[in-house]
Amino acid sequence: MKIHEYQAKQLLRAAGVAVPQGIVARTPDEAAQAFTTLGGSLAVVKSQIHAGGRGKGRFTEHPEQRGVVLVRSAAEAQQNAARMLGSTLVTIQTGEAGKQVNTLFVEQGLKIARELYLGIVVDREAGGPVLIMSSEGGMEIEEVAKHSPEKILQEPFDAVAGLYPYQARKLAYALGLDAAAVRSAEKFLPKICRFFVDYDCSMTEINPLVVTEDGQMLALDAKVTFDDNALFRHKDVVALRDLSEEEPAEVRAADTGLSYVKLNGNIGCLVNGAGLAMSTMDLIKLHGGEPANFLDVGGGADEDQVTEAFRIILADSNVKAVLVNIFGGIMRCDIIVSALLNAYEKVGFNVPLVVRLEGTNVEKAREMLQASGRAIIAATDLTDAAQKVVRALNA
Amino acid sequence: MSILVSKATRVITQGITGNSGLFHSQKCREYAAECQPGVDVFVGGVTPGKGGTTVDGFPVFNSVREAREKTGANTSMVFVPPPFCADAILEAADAGMELIVAITEGIPVMDMLRVRRGLEKSTSRLIGPNCPGVITPGVAKIGIMPGYIHKPGTIGIISKSGTLTYEAAWQLGRVGLGQSTAVGIGGDPINGTSYIELLKMFQDDPGTEGILLIGEIGGSAEQAAAEYIKSHVTKPMAGFIAGQTAPPGKRMGHAGAIISGGGGTAAEKMSALSAAGVVVSASPGGMGEAMLRAMQRAS
C-alpha cells in the first residue's frame, strides 16, 4: 500500500524524523493561508498524487503549470493552487491519462547545501533491511546504479537492533558531510531505519534528502510503501489509504479476495494460482497474443468469486477473448465448471471463451462443459489453449 | 530414495483445529495411509488452549514440545494464521522439530526476518512459507498438493509456485517421468530454504537423477542458483521462469513476485540458468519436454 507525501511526512515527524514545516491545502485560499502561516519569504507548493516525477510533470488543462512550484507570496501560492487543484497532472509515472490533483502540500523553503539520496528496502538474499545512500540526490537511483554504481553506498542493518550510530557516521563521512551534518545524520538515519521496521515498510525512499546550510538533515520528499501483509497491525496506516489513487478494478478484485492486475492487452485470463497465472500470461504472449490482465482466483475460489472475476475481466472494454486455465488440485474441476457455467449465464459473454481444465475430476468437468451446449472452446493443454484463444481472437 | 520426507517422517499439524489445518491433515493422512498401510504418519496436532482434546482422531496438544514428546513427531506442518505464524514456526524450532513446513500465506516480511534470525542457531529446516509443501510420491505428502498427480520416480522438483508445480508434475507424467521429491519453497521475499540448499540435497540424493527448477520474477535467487549449478550440480537440469510478461512495480499475486528497479526480470533469470547448462523452457507448456530433453542429452 502507498500513501501520499504529506501523510508519509506526518508519520515520519511523529517518529522523530526531521521534515520541513508543511501545511495541507485543499483550496486556493487554504494555500494562501498556508504561505502566511509558514511565515517565510519562500514556499513550495506540491501536488499530492501517488505517482513520482511531479516536479517535471505538467497539467493537461494548464500546460505551463508544473506539479511542484516555488512561490514567493501568498498571492502567488493562491494563483498556482487555483490552476493545480482539480486539474490533471501527467508525469512519467502516471501514463498519458494523468491523475487529478485534489490536495496540495505547502512547505517552507529551505536553504539547501547538499541534496542526497536515501532508500531503505529489504535485501532478500541477505535476509535483512539495507539502507542505501548516494551523493546524487534528486536523480533516479536506477540511473545512478547504471551509470555510476560507485556512488551508491549500502549499509545493511539488523531489523531488531536497528542502525547503530557508528553506521550512520560511516555513511555520513563517506558522503563527505561536514561536522554539523554528521551529528544530524547520527540522529536522522537511525530514526528513519527504526521507522522502516516499526511500520512494516517494504520501501522508504527520501529523494532528495537534504542538508541545509546550517547542517540539518531533513526529508524533503518522502515515498513510503507498506507491506500489505502487515497492515492488520497498522490501523493508522490503513486509515490513510486513498482509493482514488488505485485502479478501481484492482480494488474491487481485492475486496472479493482475488488477485488482479490490469494490463494493456486484449485477452482476459482467469487462472488459479499466482505462478500459473503469470505463466498463462507468458504463454499468451509467446503465441502472439497480449494478456489483458493477471487474475489469480486462488486455491479455494467459490462461485461468487468466479462470477465476480468474470465481471471484472469483461468490464475491461479491451478484452476481446477470455482464457480460463484451471489446474484443479484440492479445488475440484467440476466445482469450477459449475461456477463457470453459472457465471457464464449471469454475466453474459459476448466474446469467445477458451477453457483449459486439468486435475481432480477433470472428466466429469469436461462432460459438464460438453452437455451445457454453451459456445465454450475446450482446450487440452496449455499450448493448445493459447493457440485456440489467439485464433478465436483473430477469427 | 528422496529428500526431506522419508518413511521415518512423523508429522504434527500446528493449527490443526482450523478449517484448512484439519482438512489438509486429513488429506495428508489418507495419502500416507495409501502409501504406507498400517503406519501412522500424521500423529496429531497443536492448538494452544485446546490440548487434551481430539479432532477427527488426531490428538491435540497445547505446545509443540508436548506434541513431540508424546507422539515422537519430527516434522511440523504449519497452518497457523499469518499474524501468529512466525511465532508458531519459532516454537516448532525451539521444540526441536527437524523439518517445519509452513503453508500459511501472508506472513509480514518483518516477521520472517525475525524467524530467519531465530533459525540461525537452530538445526531445524524451514520450508516455505506461502508454499504447497513437500511430497515424496509413494511415501508421504506434507502440504496441500493433490497426491495423485505426483508419480514416484527420479526427478526432483524445486518450485516457488503451487499450481505451476502441479502443472509441471502432470507434464512430467505425460513424458513418463516421476518424482523423487517435489518441494515448494514458496513465493515470499524471505523464505526458509533456498534453491541452493535443495540443489545440494538433490545432487547428493542417489534417488534423484534429474532436477526441474521452477522460478519466477523478483529478487535474484534464480541467478544465485545458476551460479551454484555451474560448479556443483552434475545432474541434468531443466527450468522455467514465470512472469516474462509481468510489468515492473506490480506485485503478481505472490508477495515476492515483483520486478523492482529493473532487477529480477524473467529474461535475466532465464539467461543465467541457460548459461549454467540448464535446459530452459520458454513456454510453461514445455516443462516436461525440457526435462526429457535434459535427461536424453545426459545419457
Image: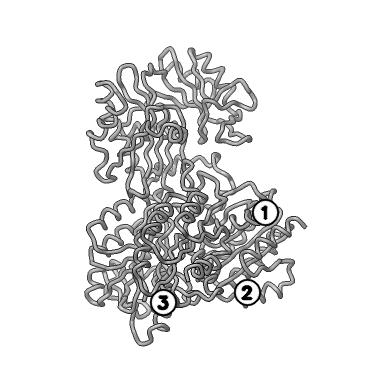
Q: Locate residue B7, reporting x and y percent.
A: 33, 79
The residue identified by callout 1 is A288
Q: Is residue B33 above or below residue A176?
A: below
Q: Chain of mark 3?
A: B
Q: Nearer the viewer, residue A293 or B234?
A: B234
**Alpha-carbon span between mark 1 and mark 2:** 29 Å
Q: Element under label 1?
A: loop
Q: Chain of mark 2?
A: A
Residue B240 visible, this orientation: yes
Please identify, in this view, whether the residue under mark 3 or under mark 1 is nearer the observer: 1
Q: Chain of mark 1?
A: A
Residue shown at the point (57%, 44%) measured from the top left: A247
Q: Are marks 1 and 2 on the same chain?
A: yes
Q: Is residue B36 above or below residue B232?
A: below
Image mark for residue B26: 3
Q: Element under label 3?
A: helix
Q: Element under label 2?
A: helix
Residue shown at the point (23%, 63%) measured from the top left: B94
